[in-house]
Image: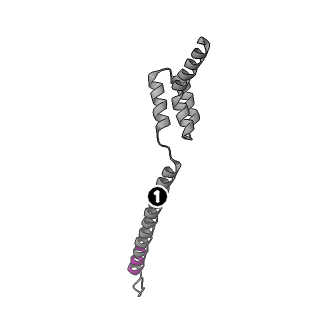
């Protein structure tokens, strides 16, 4: 009977120790292996255990990241294309002015 209680206590202690790893695996965290390594190697320090727990508990939703990345890329692309268009327009106006200053002929820009 004592051996059964001893085994149950060991399983309970290991389960408590590995809570960050279990949680990371249950959440399908992309860094689950790294969290497990940190948990096993540094979990015996209280700071390492809490760091692994916080890392495993952090929301790591690929959909949110990809949506934010798409929004950033589309905004950056829009701003970049607007800047290019403005630059081309200013360059065309400048070229037109240079041509009219060099030639007296009636050049319509």
User: In the rendering, at what x and y percent does residue 56 appear?
Assistant: 50, 35
- Along the line of sight, the residue nearer the viewer: 76 or 4: 4
Q: Is residue 96 left or right of 15 when viewed as pictured?
A: left
- Can see residue 31? no
Image quadrant where one finds the C terminus: bottom left
Dot 1, how many residues are within 10 Å of its Cα: few (below 14), some (14-19), or many (20+)? few
**Coordinates of residue 35 in the picture (x, y in percent):** 54, 32
Element type at mark 1: helix
In the rendered image, which quarter is residue 28 located in? top right
Residue 36 in magenta stretch: no
Quarter occupied by residue 88? bottom left
In the displayed structure image, the side of residue 58 where residue 26 appears, left or right = right
- Magenta stretch, overall SS: helix
Q: Where is residue 66 in the image (x, y as percent from the top left)?
A: 51, 53
Residue drawn 57% across and 36% down? Answer: 25
Residue at image point 47% right, 25% down: 48
Residue situated furthest front in the rendering: 1
Quarter of the image with the N terminus is top right
Left or right: residue 107 compared with residue 20: left
Seen in the picture, residue 80 relative to 17 is either above or below; the reply is below
In the rendered image of this protein, does residue 29 appear above or below residue 64?
above
Q: Give percent across and percent down for residue 51.
A: 46, 30
100 in relation to 55, above or below: below
Rendered residue at 49%/55% (across/down): 67
Q: Mark 1 points at which residue?
A: 71
Give the residues drawn in magenta, as a range. 94-100
């Amino acid at each position: 009977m004592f051996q059964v209680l001893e085994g149950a206590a060991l399983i309970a202690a290991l389960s408590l120790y590995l809570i960050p790893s279990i949680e990371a695996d249950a959440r399908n965290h992309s860094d689950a292996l790294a969290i497990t390594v940190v948990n096993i190697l540094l979990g015996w320090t209280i700071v390492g255990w809490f760091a692994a727990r916080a890392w495993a508990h952090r929301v790591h939703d690929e959909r949110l990241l990809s949506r934010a990345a798409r929004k950033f890329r589309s905004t950056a692309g829009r701003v970049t294309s607007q800047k290019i268009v403005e630059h081309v327009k200013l360059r065309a106006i400048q070229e037109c002015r240079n041509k009219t200053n060099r030639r007296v002929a009636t050049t319509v820009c």
